[in-house]
Image (cartoon, rainbow, N blue to C red):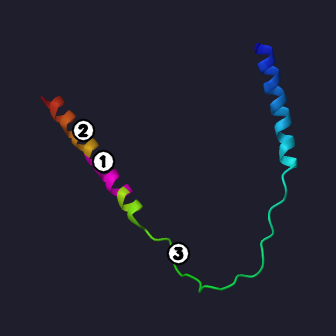
């Protein structure tokens, strides 16, 4: 049974690269844009929404929890 699994694994590893040759090329880029926007200065225009606020607040809460546990551990060691 192990020999069959090993041979099928080896045959799959040999045949997998052949699959990439059957893939087509990249799609055509298309025509010119229908409208143009003015260039943005100083970076992108991605909004910093609620997700960033949640991430920062959870990281601050986690850091505070670790700090309180560290201080409690230090206080217990001093006694």
Is 49 colored magenta in this rendering? no
Q: Position of residue 39 (x, y in %)?
A: 59, 84
Q: Are marks 3 and 2 in contact (CB under 8 Å)?
A: no
Q: Provide residue 76's location: percent of width, then percent of height.
A: 16, 30
**Residue 47 in the image, given as x and y percentages of width and height:** 46, 71
Residue positioned 36% across, 61% down in the render: 53
Vertical relation: 20 (above or below) 73: below
Report crowding for label 2: few under 14, some 14 to 19, many 20 or more residues within 10 A (C-alpha): few
Q: Height in image: 69 above or below 3?
A: below
Tell which circle, 2 or 1, labels the residue nearer the N-terminal end: 1
Q: Secondary structure at mark 3?
A: loop
Q: CA distance from mark 3 to mark 2?
A: 40 Å
Q: Residue under circle 2?
A: 70
Task: Compute the Cα span from label 2 to label 1.
Answer: 10 Å
Observer-nearest residue: 13 or 60? Answer: 13
As rendered, which of 62 and 16 lies closer to the eye?
16
The quadrant where residue 2 appears: top right
Q: Looking at the figure, which quarter contains the N terminus?
A: top right
C-alpha separation, residue under disc 3 versus residue under disc 1? 30 Å
- Nearer-the-camera pick, 66 or 76: 66
Badge number at residue 42: none
| Residue under label 1 | 63
Relative to residue 36, is residue 3 depicted above or below? above
Q: Which mark is residue 43?
A: 3
Element under disc 1: helix
How would you rate the neighbour count of disc 1 (Cα within 10 Å): few for under 14, some for 14-19, many for 20 or more?
A: few
Name the residue rendered at 59%, 86% in the picture: 38
> Earlier along the polypeptide chain: callout 3 or callout 2?
3
Q: How many marks do you count on the picture?
A: 3
Q: Which residues are magenta?
A: 55-64
Q: Is residue 50 above or below residue 38?
A: above
């Amino acid at each position: 049974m192990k020999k069959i699994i090993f041979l099928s694994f080896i045959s799959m590893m040999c045949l997998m690269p052949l699959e990439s040759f059957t893939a087509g090329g990249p799609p055509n880029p298309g025509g010119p844009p229908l409208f143009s926007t003015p260039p943005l200065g100083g970076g992108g225009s991605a909004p910093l929404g609620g997700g960033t606020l949640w991430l920062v607040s959870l990281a601050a809460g986690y850091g505070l929890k670790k700090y309180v546990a560290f201080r409690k551990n230090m206080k217990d060691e001093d006694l």
